[in-house]
Amino acid sequence: MASSAFTRRGFLAAAGGALLLPSAALAAVAESVPKDKRRMLQVNGYALDAETPLDALTTYITPNDLFFVRHHWNPMYPDLRRWALTVDGEVSAPRELTLADLKKLPRAEATCVLQCAGNGRGLYRPPVAGVQWKAGAVGNARWTGVRVKDVLERVGVKSTAKHLHTFGSDKPPEKVPPFQRSLEIEKALADGILAWEMNGQPLPALHGAPLRLIVPGWAGDHWMKWLVRLSPQPEAQTGFYMDTAYRYPKTPGEPGAPVAPENTQPVTELFVKSSITDAPSAAKVGAAVTIRGFALSGAPDIAKVEVSEDGGTSWRDAALDPRHEPYAWRLWSFRWEPRAAGRATLLVRATDSRGSVQPKEAVWNPSGYLHNAWPSAEIEVAA
Amino acid sequence: MTRWRRLAAAALAVALGVAAAGPMLAKAPRKKSKTKTPAAADFDVKLPVLGTSLQEYPAGSGKAVADVACLQCHSASMALQQRLTEKQWTNAVEKMMRWGAAVPADKKAELIAYLVANFGPDNDRFEAPVTRPVGK
């Protein structure tokens, strides 16, 4: 990678923490993605699905044009000239809100991870049906808009409202069921944002313009794009995308075995996970190399990231980037000095602020959600 | 090209802010985009624009059924990347038929056999097309 793509800012910030051991000092953090890494992997031509190669996910903020794209079908984008958000249901004053109306409310901002529930599906064995994402259906962005709470209070949400039903403008083809969703209103009121900006730019059409729901810490299926209607209701939404899809076993079963619907629950919080974005394929004994990556969780923060060179028996702390906003990802780096020639395997695991530790193996599930096994880097070490 | 696919191409052309960038969009009217496109220096201009490069089903008995029924709603990549058993493919085809895929009753077995033969558990042929980023 071009050294011009890096600054020493991250390093200096980390070096300010005097307790860090030399091996745990944060390596320089990329501030932009080099041109030769700026590309997408198109896993589906239409409906359009594309993931970001891991070696392009090296910056704290994922650029909009490199952010993964997921569609259930070809979207029908709202007519921006006539767009308004309908808010109805268990509210005392149902109404339609234009973007101008929304922009009069207090501005809210959050930097957090958006990850597809199925990120990593392609890594499950035995394989399961669906988009075979590898590890790049994830990104970290700054979302700007208004709190769901401020909107719902303005329309007088009632205490009978327990679930927030969300509707986008897209319509399925043929007899495909509509993508209608709901989430617990407590979560929507606590953290939800209705965003019209992504990384300081108007929200791109591919990412839900003019308005999408941001649900920090929760999987992307809750982050409804092209929002046209919010409806607080006493009961959860029903339909294929609530009752069949986006569900995860309550208890792990046998890989490959079916799971009874009553033994499943909705996918909500992300599982603690680290990914490696940069590692050399070759090294020399005695010459230190750096591996880098990000770590994320449905908990607000990452407590530590560790690296093992002995198959997971012993672990050493990686250095964490000082930037850590709630539900954002945490960049990390690890300086490794090879001591013996041969093929080395470095394993990585993250621990979140609630103490959840990334598992060696992801729990197999019939729809392939929330894959979070330890990632590894294979390095050929020359004498 | 079906109506749905023409719609897809038109929607993509608008969404991506590109003018006639690939074979699918060759007949699309040129539109001036108000959104700022990434500077040429930001990416390799030889790469296809995201959404404009489509893969095809491999030749074989059953391709004609797949070309009609499956391409109604999604590109071939969706199937090309799968690694499913006969049971899983049967479930998938039946689900898609419930959802409106035009699979004639007497062609269902042929389609499933084709999918299993080409995209069975050992399928390792799929490579996602590398594309130019869009949508700043």
Image (spheres, coloured by chain):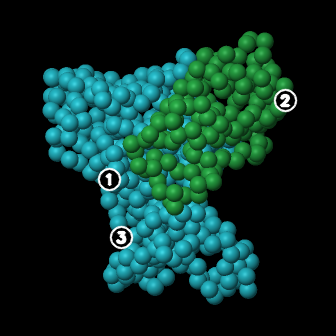
Chain colours: A cyan, B green
Horizontally, residue A187 falls left or right of residue A58, namely left
> Residue B118: which disc?
none
Residue at 32 percent of width and 53 percent of height: A200
Q: Which residue is mark 1?
A: A200
Report the Cα–Cα distance between label 1 and label 2. Answer: 49 Å
| Quadrant of residue A191 within the rendered picture | top left
Indicate the amino acid at tag 3.
Pro
Q: Position of residue B45 (x, y in %)?
A: 59, 54
Q: Position of residue A358 (x, y in %)?
A: 51, 57
Q: Work out whether disc 1 and disc 2 sit on a shared chain.
A: no
Horizontally, residue A210 falls left or right of residue A139, namely left
What is the secondary structure assignment of the residue under circle 3?
loop
Q: Output the chain of dot 3.
A: A
Q: Which residue is mark 3?
A: A322
> Residue B60: which disc?
2
Indicate the amino acid at tag 1.
Gly
Of labels 1 and 3, earlier in sequence is 1
